């Protein structure tokens, strides 16, 4: 049986590539880490061409967490978003989706998906003043902790094994994780079952309380998917898991979106 191939681009500041690759490999995928080189214009152009080629040969595109170019200028994920908006890469991404490929963005990767337009409506480059964004945490500094999230929808291959109401304990580590969205767009996302994870209290109820919602996200949103469900973006580091990690933390600490994605890719 052929293993699905996951391409993991590494941008300046990415720091979760090894963990993410390991999570996919443990789920049965083959992985390729690709270093995007930005030393000069020639290296950038070459990297764009090579990245597009890897996307064309892959089943899953995974954008890992980190702090691309120090989250500057003007906010997180902009460098990765600009790469995704490049016509060559954009064409490869659109082809990937058309052949039932999957896309994942965690933390910095989620920020890039939102700021490129891939989330929430899978339209690269179509970002306007009404588009959702990810902004500085309410406490105006980095947060690093284990938090609780609840499954609010399973309308995605990434969530095929989950049940609505299921609670996970996941690691977060970010300075700009506050999901900001208008009431109008939020209503669309909930109606389309695109809100898949929300920060929650001990009973699994979505919460705006800072004790449970560590960045102040509107509607307690932690993760969303595209209308087709093939693109998932989330702030929590689902890849930071392991048998002997967080031994003093109770609850379900395995959010295996990776296994769900691999099983889907094998079938499709």
Image (cartoon, grey):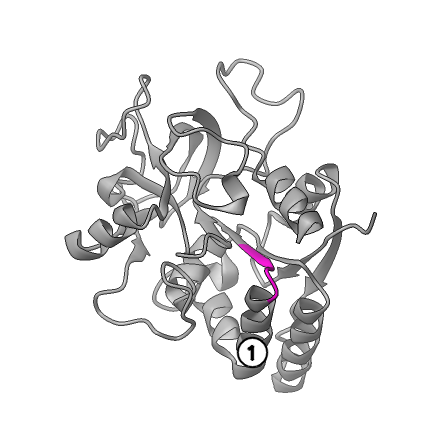
* Residue 56 at x, y percent in the picture: 68, 71
Q: Depth check: 131 or 152 in front?
A: 152
Type of secondary structure dominating the magenta stretch: loop
Question: How many circles with numbers are drawn on the protein?
Answer: 1
For this view, does 73 lie left or right of residue 68? left
Q: Per the image, is 37 magenta?
A: no
User: Which x, y percent locates residue 79?
Assistant: 48, 69
Q: Secondary structure at mark 1?
A: helix
Range drawn in magenta: 99-103
Q: Position of residue 126 (x, y in %)?
A: 34, 74
The answer to whether one can see residue 108 in this image is no
- In the displayed image of the protein, which residue is found farthest to the bottom? 42
The one of 51 and 258 positioned closer to us in this rendering: 258
Residue 84 in view, yes or no: yes
Q: Report the residue at 62% width, 41% height from top.
A: 258
- Report the residue marked by disc 1: 91
Tell me: residue 112, above or below residue 87.
above
Image-based side of 220 in relation to 59, left or right: left
Q: Residue at x 34, y 67 (%)?
A: 74
* Residue in front for this viewpoint, 133 or 194: 194
Q: Residue at x 63, y 60 (%)?
A: 10
Mark 1, other Cα within 10 Å: few <14 / some 14–19 / many ≥20: some
Q: Residue furthest left?
A: 183
Residue 241 sits above or below residue 175 on the image: above
- Quarter location, residue 102: bottom right
28 vs 199, nearest the viewer: 28
Furthest-right residue in view? 1
Residue drawn 46% across and 52% down? 229
Q: What quarter of the picture does the C terminus occupy? A: bottom right
């Amino acid at each position: 049986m052929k293993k699905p191939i996951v391409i993991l681009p590494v941008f300046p500041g990415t720091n979760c590539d090894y963990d993410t690759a390991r999570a996919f490999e443990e789920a049965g995928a083959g992985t390729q880490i690709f270093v995007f080189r930005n030393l000069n214009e020639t290296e950038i152009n070459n990297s764009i061409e090579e990245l597009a080629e890897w996307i064309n040969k892959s089943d899953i595109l995974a954008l890992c967490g980190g702090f691309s170019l120090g989250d500057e200028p003007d906010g997180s994920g902009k460098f990765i978003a600009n790469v995704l908006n490049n016509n060559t890469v954009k064409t490869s991404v659109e082809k990937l989706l058309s052949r039932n490929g999957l896309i994942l963005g965690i933390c910095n990767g989620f920020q890039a998906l939102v700021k490129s337009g891939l989330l929430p409506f899978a339209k690269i480059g179509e970002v306007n003043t009404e588009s959702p964004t990810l902004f500085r945490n309410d406490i105006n500094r980095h947060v690093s902790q284990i938090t609780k999230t609840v499954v609010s929808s399973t309308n995605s291959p990434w969530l095929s094994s989950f049940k609505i109401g299921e609670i996970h304990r996941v690691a977060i580590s970010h300075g700009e994780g506050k999901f900001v969205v208008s009431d109008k767009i939020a209503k669309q996302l909930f109606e389309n079952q695109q809100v898949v994870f929300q920060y929650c209290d001990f009973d699994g109820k979505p919460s705006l309380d800072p004790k449970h919602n560590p960045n102040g996200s509107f509607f307690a949103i932690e993760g969303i998917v595209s209308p087709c469900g093939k693109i998932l973006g989330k702030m929590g580091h689902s890849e930071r898991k392991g048998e002997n990690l967080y031994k003093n933390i109770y609850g379900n600490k395995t959010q295996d979106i990776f296994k769900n994605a691999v099983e889907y890719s094998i079938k499709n």
